[in-house]
Image (spheres, helix red, strand yellow):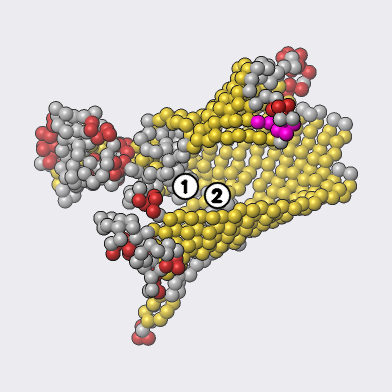
Amino acid sequence: MAMATETVIRRNGIRSSYNVFGTYELLDGLKAKVSAGMYAYDEKYDFYRPTSLTSGVNPPYSVQAQADANAVARTTGEKDYLGEFTLNYIKSLGNHSVQGVLGLSAQQNEFDRVEVKATGYQDDHIIEITGHGANASDITLTGETRKSVWSMASFFAQLHYNLLERYFLSASFRGDGSSLFGPLNRWGYFPSVSGGWTVSGEDFYRTAFGASSVLKLRTSWGLSGNNSIGNYNHTQVMSSPVGVPNGSNGILTAMYPEAFKDRGLGWESTSQFNLGLDLGLFDGRLSVIANYYNSQTFNLLFNQSISAISGSTGYLTNLPDSKIRNRGVDVQADGWLISTPDFSVKLGGNIGVNRNKVLDLGGSGTILTNGAERSYMTHITREGDPVGMFYGFKVAGMVREADMANLAEDDLHYDASTRQFTGGYKIKGPPRSVAQTAKLMPGDLYFHDRNGDGIVDDDDKEIIGSPHPDFIYAFNLAANFRGADFTASFNGSHGNRVIDGQDYYIYNMEGSGNNYRDVAQRYRDEQNPGNGKVFRASRGGTQSNSTRLSTFYLQDGSFLRCTNITLGYTVADVAKATHGNVSFLRFYLAVDNAFTVTRYKGYNPEVDYNNGNNLTPGVDYGKYPLVRAFQAGIQLSF
C-alpha cells in the first residue's frame, strides 16, 4: 500500500495532428489530390521512489532505504510525417463503371527520448532529479535514452470495374520500400485481385426467392508484407572500446563488431486466398456474413541462432523457403428478434475457427524458445505442428505408499553415476527424474517416461498443450423500449491452455509466501491423500516443484467475458420542452468488463506476457488485470 500511495509518478503529454489537402480536376472524371499530414507527441515523465519505503527487510528511512531511493526524468518526442499524391479517375458508360487510382506516398517517423536517473537522496524534500546526491555517479543517463528515424516510400495502383451493379472486379499493385530493411532487399511488391457477384440481382434469383433476400458471393487473393522488426536490425554496430593484447607492445584500445547483421534482411510476406458470402433475409431482419481463408506466410523473419564461438549468438534474418499456414472460417450473424415501433430486440454474434500449421522452417529445424522467467524452454515450433506449442513433461501420476517397495527394488539396480539402470533392468515403480533433488516420496508427482528407459530426462519432453483456442466467439444484445435502451456485449475463447508462471510461487508450499486455496487438498498421508493432484508440501525442492514445465502448470484458458453493459434513457420531446435549445438528451449508466466466467486461477485468462511474440504465446506472469470501469453520463445535443 505504501508503494502505491507514496511513489510519485507524473506523466504529462500533448498529442496533436495536422492535415492539409488539395484537389484539382485535370479532366472530366480525372482528379489530382495532394495531401500532407503530421502527427506529434511530446511527453514529460517524472518518477520518484521516496526514502519512506522499506528496502526488503530494512525499515523506512534506513541507510538501505536511502540507497534505494531514486528519481527518473524522461522526455519523449515523436513526429510522424506523411505525404500522398494521387490521381483518381472515375468513368461510367451505360452499365459499365470504372475507377482507377495511381499514387505515391512517403512517410518518415522520428523518435527522440532522453532519460536521466538520480540517486543519493538523504530525505524526501526534493522529489525530482535536481535533489540528487553530490557524487558524479548519482546522476546517470539510462538505457532508455535513444533516438531513431525510419522512413518508407510507396507507389500503388488500383483498378475497380463494375457491371450492372452485379459483377465486380478489382486489381491492385503496390511497392513499398522500408528503411527498416537492409540495402540489398529493401523493396517488397504486393499484388491483389478480387471479384464479387450479387446473385440476388439476377432474374432467376428474384423469381425463385423474391425480393426479400440478398446474396453476394466474394473471392480475393493478395500478398501483404510485414516490416515490424524495429530499427537498425541490418546495421552493423561496433562495441565500446576495449583493451586488446598486442604482443610485446602491451594493450591497445580497439573495437569489434558486436553482432552479425544481415544486409539482405527483407519483407516477410503473406499470401492469402478468401472466399465469402453475404446473405440478407426477411427484408434485412437477418444477415449472415461467412468467410473462408487460407493464408501462407513465407520468408519468415526470425532470430537465427548461431554458434557463440563466432562472437555472437544469433542474428535477425529471413528463413529461406519457410512457410506457415493459417486457414479457417469466420461466421457472423445479426438479426432483429423483435421489431416494433415501441419495442425492439437485436441479437448478433460471430465465431471464428483458425488452424495453424508450420509447413517448412527453411532448414532451421526445431525451434525451442523460452517464454517464462525461468531457464528452461517452454515452447516448441516444428514442421507439422502449430507455432509455439507448449513443450515439457506430462504428469503421469502421484507416488503412493504402495509404490515405495517397488521404488526400493528399483534403487538396487540404479547407477547414480551414469543415471541409468544396469543390465537392461525394467523398473517396477514410477520412473525417476534426473532433475529430482531427493528420492521419490509419497505425495511426489512423477512424469511420463516416453522412451521406457525408466529415466525421465529431456528425451521424454513432448508437446503438452496448445495455447491456440479451438474457436473464439463474441455476441451482443441490444434492446429498446420506448425511450429506454439496453446493450450488452460478450466475447470468449475455448480450448486453449495457459502457463500461469505465478504457480511456481503460489504452489511452492515452503512457507515463504501465500498459496492457492487448493493446497489444502495436497497429499499429507495415505489417510489424507487430498485430491490426488496437488503434491505434498516440502521445505526443500523436489522433482514435483522443480524448475521444469509440466502439465501441472498448465491451466484451461477458456473464458466468457462480459465486456460492456449499458443502460440508457433518451428523453422524448426534449426539443419541444426546451423550446429548441436542446435537441437531444440521454442519460446512461455503463460498466466495462463486468464479469468473466473462467476456470483460470490467474488475473486474466486472455494473457500476453510476451507482448505478441508468436513463438511464445499463452504465458502469464502476473500481467496486470483488466480494469472494471463504471460510468455515468449525459449526452446532450444543442
Give the mark nearest the N terminus, 1 or 2: 2
Toward the bottom, the furthest residue is: 249
427 horizontally vs 447: left or right: left
Image location (x, y in percent) of residue 613: 47, 47
For residue 581: magenta? yes
Residue found at x 22% / y 41%? 509
Q: Nearer the viewer, mark 1 or mark 2?
A: 1
Residue 256 marker = none
Q: Amino acid at mark 2?
A: Asn
Q: Amino acid at mark 1?
A: Asn
How many circles with numbers are drawn on the protein? 2
Front one among 116 and 324: 116
Q: Can residue 150 be seen by looking at this rendering?
A: no
The dominant secondary structure in magenta is loop
The residue that mark 2 highlights is 299
315 horizontally vs 177: left or right: left
Residue found at x 40% / y 64%? 125
- Whole-angstrom CA distance, mark 1 to mark 2, is 22 Å
At label 1, counting other C-alpha atoms closer than 10 Å, the crowd grade (few under 14, some 14-19, many 20 or more) is few
Image location (x, y in percent) of residue 17: 66, 52
At label 2, counting other C-alpha atoms closer than 10 Å, the crowd grade (few under 14, some 14-19, many 20 or more) is many
The residue that mark 1 highlights is 611
Front one among 549 and 5: 5
Image location (x, y in percent) of residue 108: 64, 58
The region drawn magenta spans 580-585
105 up-or-down from 118: above or below: above
Residue found at x 76% / y 14%? 207
499 up-or-down from 11: above or below: above
